[in-house]
Image: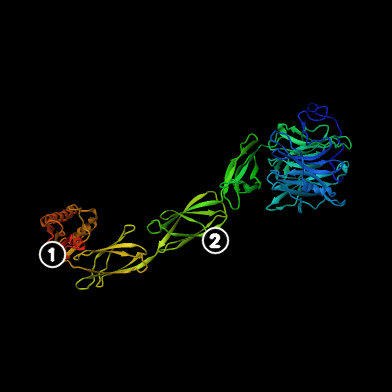
Amino acid sequence: MRIKIFTEKTGIILFFLFFSVTGIAQTAEFLPEPLNLTDKRTIAPYVSYDGKSVVFISQTKQYRRMEESKKQADGTWSNPIPIDAVNIYDSLGWYIDAPTYNSDATVIYFSMLEDDRNASFDIYYTKKIKGVWSSPVKMKEPINGYGDDTDPFISYDEKFLYFARRFEDKEFEDYECYKIYVSEKNDTAWGTPKALPEPVNSTCDRAPRMAADGKTLYFMSVRGNKKTGIDLYYTKKITKNAWLAPILIDTVNNTQDEAYPSIPLSGDSLYYQIKSKKKNAKDEKIVKDKLSLGFRPEKTTLFFGYVTDLKSGKPLKANINIIDPNTSEILSKITTDEKNGKYSLFLQKGKKYRIEVFNKNFSHFFFYFDARKITKFQEIQKNITLFKNVNLILNVYDTEIYEPIPAQITVFDKISGSEEDIPVTSLGKGRFNLNLSIGKEYNIDVKHKHFKGNSFDLDLRGVVQFSEFERDIELQVKKVDYEINLSNQETGEGVEALVEITNLSTNEKIIKKIKTGKDGKLKLKLRDGTQYEISVKPKGYAFYNTTVNLVDEDADYSLNAELQPLKKNTKLKLNDIRFETNSADLNESSYTELNRLVDLMQTNPQMKIEISAHTDDVGSGSYNLKLSKRRAASVKEFLFDKGIPKDKIVSKGYGESKPAFLPADTKENRAKNRRVELKVIDIKS
């Protein structure tokens, strides 16, 4: 056998109160069958951090096998299961030894010797993939390549690899001596291994096992007068390159050789291997013992649970980063079990942590934990759900008037430029919902035929924490050149006047005054796709108003208005003056035109007018005459209420006596003959 456990332990039995007649501490207990079978040697055991898995070497006269056992719900251990992917090499004459788990027992590190007497032990690992252990992978230099390397152990955060490297020491000629080395991982590569400084490695040390606190190191060693054999020690890391002097764990060390320590997260117990000091003894067994307070690691917290898809409930393979929130440094990384989404992570006492959980095509989840004041080991279950899609609520606004726009939304893949088949749901005017996949980068294009298009990029490849968010996007309306030409109806000369333009969609009013000039022109920039009402209020002229439609592509972009001069006997028809049926009460729809009449009177205070009301020929003549007089009086009263002096207004009713449209007995002409007119009685210059 090329490598062997330290041998030849002799000496006086100390601390006799702790030991039974068998030489085992009274607090210790053998792990029951099927782990410790009488017909097998149980060598180099290692119990996982959570205390629920154990891996070891089982040896008989015929074979040497790596096996693992799981603690069952009732507290018993399952029958050991051979790790065939590794054992096949031993059946070919190779030699396997010293297995240990990573933090969540999904990777086993071990040493192996090829069937070559001139070869050396090297470090390998196997991964559990979908419940099956993979073929061993040999670690690359600088880990291997310098003689015998064995007893590998990966720290809980997987940033440090501890192992033992053999050296020759004539002082310890009865033992195969080793020193403990450590390699630190930088990004994805392992650094050059360095021997731990003295007082560690002052003699023959091996089987390093770092507790989850990242500070307390347990190992087996031959120290003292060399006659005490193999004992268990512990030391603490003070700084990166400084360690406390190793201390003998005297509450478990006894008359037998103790080796290969394991320290679960709780830190209150210790698993290890014992072996009789008798020469050629083959009675290695696994023992569990209590750890006295003085030998325990610092307290830690175990977070565990499952990561699942929010929508389907299926387990997810996710990445978990443990981060220092003050520096944003990633302290360690783990991955959930691909088969069931399970994870477990350990947080050391004394720090604050930010935990990031994510999957490439799913959301990110963060939670924080303050471990500065924890007083005991604790287990916290935290199940996490990640989602694959987000809802983008898009609000499209007019950049000038902040009104919502019923735009057209198109989504493109930013990388390929191809259009994405993503439904766009309308949530109301100018408000849309888009369901987008995390892990992609999009370009979202927003268009409306009367507005300049706009677009924005949305990168969902990074950190996404929320399943719904809103974004506002503004569109700038297209402007068209619009020209207004005002002229005197009789002379054709330009007219100076106030022009009031009302956006019928928004009721926005723009008041412009035409510059004095013979041409009477006004040039404006109006919004494309909009309906306007244009009202002209010139002094000395009849008011003028019209509706302009700029929605159609063939819209006319100019207005030529001939204004009627106000003179004596000038007649103006008042449009849309309506009354309740067979009544003199004004309908509210009449107020717009009547207000224009008020403006006309206020603009031309020197004018006196007659308001005349006319009816159709339906009904008796006397009734129609009385009705028309009452209606003319109602208009006069409206003007008076608006501040127009009564002496400026004369009201008259003509009944059906003066039809303007003949024949007067048709339905169409009767409607036209029901009218109110204005006539200028006098106007002073």
Specify the amino acid type for callout 1: Lys
Q: Earlier in the sequence, mark 2 or mark 1?
A: 2
Marks 2 and 1: CB-CB under 8 Å?
Answer: no
Residue 550 picture quarter: bottom left
Q: Which quadrant: the N terminus?
A: top right
The picture places residue 245, in percent across and down from the top left corner, at: 76, 39
Q: Secondary structure at mark 2?
A: loop
For disc 1, the neighbor class at 10 Å (few under 14, some 14 to 19, many from 20) is few
Looking at the picture, tell me which residue is in the foreground, 552 or 225.
552
From the viewer's perspective, is residue 611 above or below residue 98? below
Viewer can see residue 260: yes
Residue name at image x 22 percent, y 65 percent: 538
Q: Secondary structure at mark 1?
A: loop
2 vs 1, front mark: 2
Residue ranking furthest to the left: 622
For disc 2, the neighbor class at 10 Å (few under 14, some 14 to 19, many from 20) is some
In the displayed structure image, the side of residue 661 where residue 509 appears, left or right: right
Total of numbered circles in the picture?
2
Q: Which mark is residue 684?
A: 1
In the displayed structure image, the side of residue 401 where residue 191 appears, left or right: right
The picture places residue 475, in percent across and down from the top left corner, at: 42, 60
The picture places residue 300, in percent across and down from the top left corner, at: 65, 38
Residue name at image x 56 percent, y 53 percent: 438
- Color encoding of the figure: rainbow
Viewer can see residue 94: no
Q: Which residue, given by chain and number where applicable, does mark 2 sit on?
A: 414
The picture places residue 152, in percent across and down from the top left corner, at: 76, 46
Specify the amino acid type for callout 2: Lys
- Disc 2/disc 1 C-alpha distance (Å): 73 Å
